Amino acid sequence: MPFEENLQFLKDWECRIISNLRRAKTFLDPGDTSNIFFSVGTTAKPTDKLNPYTTPIRKISNGVICGAVVFTRTQAAIAVMVAEKYTRRIVVDAERKFHVPDSVDSNLLRHFGVESEIIALGGEGDNGCGSNSLCRAYSHDVDCYLFKSNDMTVEGIWQYLALRFKCFNRKKCTIVGGGNIGFKLAIKLVESGSIVNFVRRDPDKGIELVSAINTIRHHSAIGEAFYYAEAVAACVDCDVVIGCTDGLPAITADAVKHMRDSGVLIDVGKGSISQDGLNLAHERCIDVLRFDVTCALDGMIATIVANEKAAQRTGRAEFHGSIGLVSGGFLGAEGDIVVDDFRHPCQVFGICNGLGDFKQNLSQKDVEILQLVKSTYKIDDSSCK
């Protein structure tokens, strides 16, 4: 039976999106909408009846962000259509995690002002929310950015643990739920020096993934991954247990009782820990965290903003005819001068060897060229205004 959208629910959801975007403005100076970001995400964990939902308003370093999580391209198109009336910065999930194909309801689309042709653009040849096609075809004066929600989550968890542990060497970490997030997190922890017990119900896939982790790691890494079919044995003497299931309460009291007293329990998958497991963790004064993506979102938006600025200073300009100034990662030809900004340099980093690195042994001519650049742009090696 084809999937049918719930029109009344979508109407209410639209109102919640509008309310959040209006409230988001109150976090900023009057009239400033340039730093309101709206995210359109997807998730592998379906809600009841695949109803979309809104995400909280969060204050971040570069402004404020709110958003929505969707389960169909129709829902994604509605979210983009609503958001573009309140902000010009929309961030869309590049990952494809839809649970059902779109069934286009013309009456529903007309109600929200979404053209069926726009939905068709986000078909099998497009990934994620139909992100590129939807934003290009539906948004006019909007800057559309892509992000990877799972990778953002992985980075956020790793950063939290790095701050907590200071050093990962030989820390025992158990990951319960060896899917996309669990696998990527295991790689980072092993490469950082941790011993990772990797729990996945399917032994063939679990063993295969653990083998891949141990193959990928650098030969000098002291971290290592081990496969476990169930959580209890995997949690013995662990410093951290991370639940990455899709809502399956696989971390029970039997697993928690084997953790170290100083351990930490993190629920990434919303419902990975059973009630008796939570109760025992609280009794043992083990820290229990429901992972908060705020810091990871902040970092992701900061990276987008920084890359926008960096793109403006990426390139090459001619200097005194035959001399090239390059910056922003532009791979210069042999003899080009690497500076901080090819448009208005105030720092000189070196001379290209033509292979993506610096010349290590400079000729007298090279030295004279460097001095010419510095004198022309009044660059002082000791400081930069």
Image (tube, grey):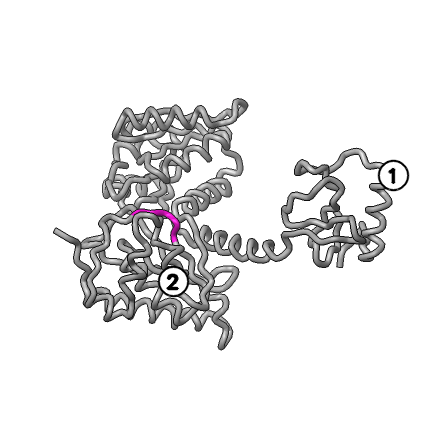
Residue 287 at x, y = what percent? 38, 43
Residue 364's label in the rendered image is: 1
Q: Are marks 2 and 1 in contact (CB under 8 Å)?
A: no
Q: Which stretch appears magenta?
A: 93-97
How crowded pointer 1 is (Cα within 10 Å; few <14, some 14-19, many 20+) is rated as few
Residue reaching furthest to the bottom: 30
Q: How many numbered tags mark residues here?
A: 2
For residue 306, the mark is none
Q: x, y percentage for residue 348? A: 76, 48
Q: Secondary structure at mark 2?
A: helix
Marks 2/1: CA–CA distance: 55 Å
Q: Say the numbered circle drawn on residue 137.
A: 2
Q: Which amino acid type is shown beneath numbered disc 1?
A: Gln
**Residue depicted at x 86% and y 41%:** 365
Closest to the observer, 170 or 308: 308
Residue beneath the point at 24% across and 48% down: 99
